Image (cartoon, rainbow, N blue to C red):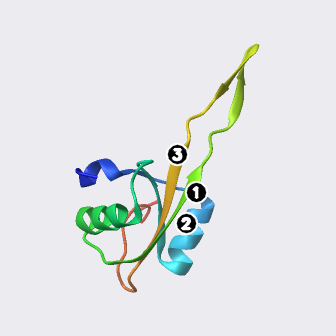
Amino acid sequence: MKDIYAVIKKPIITERSAYLKERGNKIIFQVEVNANKRDIKKAVEKVFNVHVMDVNTLNVKGKVKRFGKSFGKRPDWKKAIVTLKEGDKIELLEGI
């Protein structure tokens, strides 16, 4: 990956991600499909100025949905669970 800002698309904000953030200091991101763990680690460290301990990735298959009489498919995407060093944090939902 050339551009570190193109690797991370958006944070995933759910009840599970909030639980992982408070219990294990882990943040979940939607990332570029062809990004590898090294690219994700470099991008998170540079953009958010934190130390990344571990990166786990998984490919999420898009669901098949109905659109009237026909069927369609949502796109496949990649999820990254990033474990931060103890004491580091990313301010995503601190004010809510």
Please tell me which residue lies in front, 56 or 10.
56
Q: Residues within 10 Å of mark 2 (few under 14, many from 20)?
A: some
Q: Are marks 3 and 2 in contact (CB under 8 Å)?
A: no
Q: Are the two marked residues, 2 and 1, in contact with CB atoms closer than 8 angstroms?
A: yes
* Tag 3: amino acid: Trp
Residue with the mark numbered 3? 77
Name the residue that disc number 2 marks.
18
Three-letter code, disc 2: Ala
Q: Residue at x 55, y 66 (%)?
A: 18
Q: Which mark is residue 14?
A: 1
Per the image, label 1 sits on a secondary structure element best described as loop
Looking at the image, residue 65 lies above or below residue 30: above
User: Between 51 and 36, which is closer to the camera in this rendering?
Assistant: 36
CA–CA distance in space, label 2 to label 1: 6 Å
Q: Count how many numbered circles sit on residues in the image.
A: 3
Between 34 and 16, the one lying in front of the other is 34
State how far apart marks 3 and 2 are (Cα). Answer: 21 Å
Image position, residue 62 (x, y; %) = 62, 40
Q: Amino acid at mark 1?
A: Thr
| Numbered disc 2: secondary structure | helix
Q: Is residue 37 above or below residue 75?
A: below
Q: Is residue 85 left or right of residue 23?
A: left
Q: Is residue 10 left or right of residue 46?
A: right
Based on the displayed image, in which of its 4 quarters is residue 37 positioned?
bottom left
Tell me the CA gap for discs 1 and 3: 17 Å
